[in-house]
Amino acid sequence: MIKANKKAGLVALVLVLASISFLGWAKYKTSFVKATGKSAVVDSVATYKIDTAKVALLKRVYSKLNLNKSEFLITGSMSAKNGADTTDRLKNAQYVFSRKGTSFYFKMGATETFNANGIYLYVDHGMKKVLLAKEKQVVSGFAMPELSTVLKTVTEEGFRLNSTINGENERISFTNPDHLSCKEYSVTFNKQSLAPSKLYVRLSDGEEPENNKKDNVIDFRIQRSSTDSEIARYIAQNIVIKGNKSWSLGPAFKNYELINTL
């Protein structure tokens, strides 16, 4: 079995955060509290008044990045680092995520995933391996929470909201340097179109949340997003060929190893 790039989980994390809102970190806090018996650090900033207009604006920004649409395309780059493990890093890895109905294509660095026409393919160009399996079911994300829920959560968790403007872009951040799971979450977007261009997350280390040097940092940049998936050109590659009794690799992949789990 091919092991997916260990950063694939981080990609999924960011996409989920982008899809279901900045409350995604609450899940990390809940699991951490159950495991340790500790609670998040909440000090006097719990009475800090969150700018409701900015939160409402952020919800409008997220509506531009709705990953529950039946068809969309998003491209860009991603960097990530694990402060507790200096070997666990990703720098400016280019990604493509295209979906149309139940079909999707995902590329991250040297790996590609195809899910269409009844089959699922995972291609690792570094290891020169191709995994063939049955087509997977597309799981939808979650809807944005109510504004009152957002305000209640960020206030009770001791987060502060900051907004900065740089030219045509605005950046809205939620920060709490003492939080046990997420110390910062920010979104950068165009002031006019409200199109998001960058998501930034700083997650605390599960073992030593107070040690900032061990934080996990994810920098997710969006270069292009569209309601036209262009998926036809992404899944057109002739990677595997179905014969009378078995599958084989296409000519361009003859030096790869095929792992067939059908």
Image (cartoon, rainbow, N blue to C red):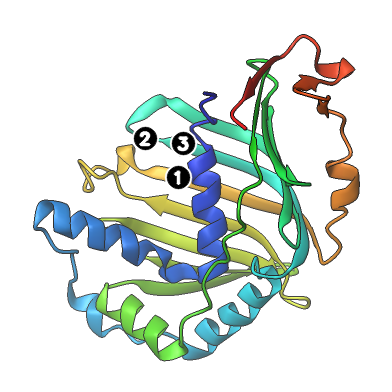
Q: Residues within 10 Å of mark 3 (few under 14, many from 20)?
A: many
Label 3 belongs to which residue?
Answer: 81
Measured as percent of width and height from the top left, residue 62 is found at: 62, 73
Is residue 242 depicted above or below 19 in this figure? above
Mark 2 Cα within 10 Å, few/some/many (few <14, many 20+)? Answer: some
Callouts 3 and 2 close, C-beta under 8 Å: yes
Check the picture and name the quadrant holding the C terminus.
top right
Q: Check if mark 1's residue and mark 3's residue have beta carbons within 8 Å.
A: yes
Mark 3 secondary-structure assignment = strand
**Location of mark 2 (residue):** 83
Of the residues shown, which amino acid type is indicated by label 2?
Gly
Between discs 1 and 2, the one toward the N terminus: 2
* Quadrant assignment, res 246: top right
Give the farthest residue toward the front: 245
Q: Contact (CB < 8 A) between labels 1 and 2?
A: yes
Residue at 51% across, 82% down: 55
Q: Closer to the camera, 108 or 56? A: 108
Where does the image place residue 28, in percent across and percent down from the top left? Answer: 31, 57
Residue named by callout 1: 217
Q: Earlier in the sequence, mark 1 or mark 3?
A: 3
Residue 107 visible in the current orientation: no
Q: Residue at x 17, y 72 (%)?
A: 43
The residues bearing labels 1 and 3 have C-alpha atoms spaced at a distance of 5 Å
